[in-house]
Image (cartoon, coloured by chain):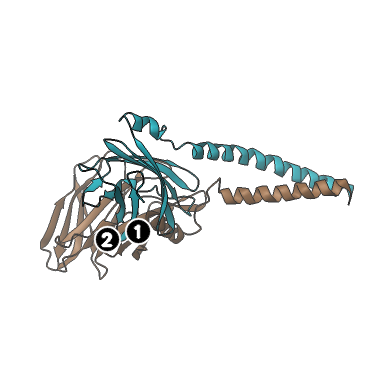
Amino acid sequence: MIRINRLFMIVRRTLLVILLLILLPYYIQDWLSDSSRGINDPIKAVSADGEFTKLKIGKTMKIDESTFTVDEVYVTTEHILLTYTYHTNQKISWSFPSMTLKLETPDGQVLESHSSGSNGTSWGERGYIWYDMPEQPVESATIIYDHYDRHFTLEIPLMKGVE
Amino acid sequence: MKKHTIITMIEWIVVIFLIWLFIHADIFPTGSRTPEKAHQLSEQGFHYGPSNVVRKVTVPFDKDQVIFLGTYKDWFSADMVQKKRGGWFPSGGVAGIKIDRSKALSYSWESINSKDSYFMTYKIFGYVTDEQITRIELTMKEKDTDNLTTITQDIKSDRMFLFIFKGDYAGNPMKSLRGMDQAGKVRYEEQLY
């Protein structure tokens, strides 16, 4: 009996150590990549344009089984920068086609992105998308996802005090 | 209960929890059990499809690569999945290509690195709109010599074709793609280089 107990203890503690050795680096790395967006602090890039407005958005649109959340919008005199979080239910998945997202202003201007970036995580990705400021300043815009037969939209404010 | 027994139980609980975490985190991705599942997940993750698969083809010279030829609404694709470490993973070609109905046929081609990078798997595939076309001919330049070889495929009711061949890094060996009618008359021709 003592022998069996001893054997169980060895198995148990070996498993414990091995699992900890595998899991700890994994979660530390995961946590590190989650806490940084991999976008070199968007405020730094935005500051290059001078003064800017930062708006907390936190709005989500569902694209099939995935969710796309606009976290923040930075508006400068020249650019609109949008940061997002993309959640998928798949472990191995394609990155989000962020360049296909267009911004449509209420007066009918359609803005296309010319620059974006993202950082993959275990659950999806975080990223950012740049747009040029429209010629006429606007209070809000609609984000349009139009890829194959999927069509989704999301309203976002571009000025403070606009819902 | 003895203190010793409690410690043993706590240790077991921690081990079970860690095993659960290990499985849940999918640290060593195992992929999908079947090529079909991998293909389905690949399309789902791409927000495309589910496509109507007309042909499932295992690459003749590499049984670890499977291609799903199919259409979805106005698009066609030849999605590829690859077997690695016992599981099936997405590979190239999930994206659908628009069928251009103003043309006799719409085609696309892609070359994908093999698992060990020793060769490239070429696939050229398409959707034939012109109902007169019953046969597709692909002409290729032979390696080392400049001789041309032609391979053909009959177009059936699904209106699709898919040629697969082994290539290397020397470049694209394809020369031309032709669509012929029943009488052998060329109704479509495209140079491929």
* Colour used to depict chain B in the structure image: brown
Q: Are marks 1 and 2 in contact (CB under 8 Å)?
A: yes
Which amino acid type is shown beneath numbered disc 2?
Trp
Q: Which residue is mark 1?
A: B48
The disc placed on residue A55 is: none
On whether disc 1 and disc 2 are found on a single subunit, the reply is yes
Res. B169 in view: no
Q: Which residue is mark 2?
A: B75
Q: Nearer the viewer, residue B159 or B76?
A: B76
- Please state the horizontal and vertical placement of residue B24, each as a whole percent of the image: 58, 51
Q: Residues within 10 Å of mark 1 (few under 14, many from 20)?
A: many
The residue located at (79%, 50%) in the rendering is: B9
Q: Which chain is cyan?
A: A
- Please state the horizontal and vertical placement of residue A82, each as a whole percent of the image: 36, 42
- Please state the horizontal and vertical placement of residue B125, each as a whole percent of the image: 26, 56
The picture quadrant where one finds residue B152 is bottom left
Which amino acid type is shown beneath numbered disc 1?
Tyr
